[in-house]
Image (cartoon, grey):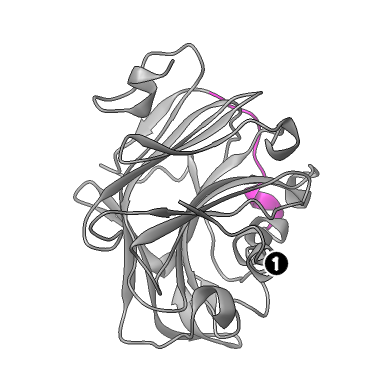
Amino acid sequence: MTTISTKVSAAIVSLGVSMLAAIAPVSAQGTLANKSFVENFDSFDRSFWYVADGWNNGAHQNCTWSKSQINAANGTLTLNLTEGQSKDRKYLCGEVQTKARYGYGTYEVRMKSATGSGLNSAFFSYIGPSDKQPWDEIDFEVLGKNTNQVQTNQYINGKGGNEALVPVKGGADQGFNDYAFVWEKDRLRYFVNGKMVHEVTDPSKIPTHDQKIFLSLWGTDTLTSWMGPFTYKGQASMVIDRVSFTAPGDKCQFPGSVACNLD
């Protein structure tokens, strides 16, 4: 694990993920659920998931969110980035978020990231101005320029700068890997493939507001110092096998869940 909080540019450009919800349509706003769930994508429940469509996060994002780039089949959810003109963007990309918000607990995803410089495959929780709340966020981001690692980060009332880079053995794009964070009032722990890789115990660096769960794949032409130069080599895909949330005190939701062995 390599801490990169001294790289101010990384803290700033992480807005690429976070701004997505800051400008989300009113229809994406959610209420608190905090009920444990496991989503295996045997089907796609639009009453549970909100699909981003017809907008983007700002000038730094080179694609427009499109429902056409979301595909749930055979027990997986695939988010794509592909060529396709929409308004002033030359590419289309996919993003989903829960309609409900969740608080302290264990958040987990099993996913295979996209390959390619200038791409960001993200699993994160977020709340902010679109829900009339302070900006809090907890991130896992695989940057396609180097899929041998994943970046963790968290924002508290809009303040980030808590990045850490964690190795992903074998490559995040070469197969499915498990990413999890356990969010508690006085501790935040990050896990990769069941192993704790980063721990935060400073209360000033732990979010406190309930958040929605996001999955997204997007690209950039401008944030090259962080995500690398964008070079389109054909459709890129991020594949999600499972997403889950386990509320404190509930039984673990599936064998191998981080929540099964928490202290």
Q: Quadrant of the C terminus?
A: top left
- The answer to if 197 sits in the magenta stretch is no
Q: Answer yes or no: is residue 197 visible.
A: yes
Compared with residue 5, is residue 56 higher up or lower down, i.e. above or below?
A: below
Disc 1 crowd rating (10 Å Cα; few below 14, some 14-19, many 20+) is few
Instruction: Give the residues in magenta.
Output: 25-34
- Residue at x 76%, y 36% (from the top left corner): 204
Q: Nearer the viewer, residue 46 or 140?
A: 140
Residue 85 left/right relative to 76:
right
Choose top left, top right, bottom left or bottom right for residue 117: bottom left
**Secondary element at tag 1:** helix
Which SS type dominates the magenta stretch? loop
- Can you tell which quarter of the image residue 34 is in? top right
Residue that label 1 marks: 8
Q: Residue furthest left?
A: 74
Looking at the picture, tell me which residue is in the foreground, 150 or 248. 150
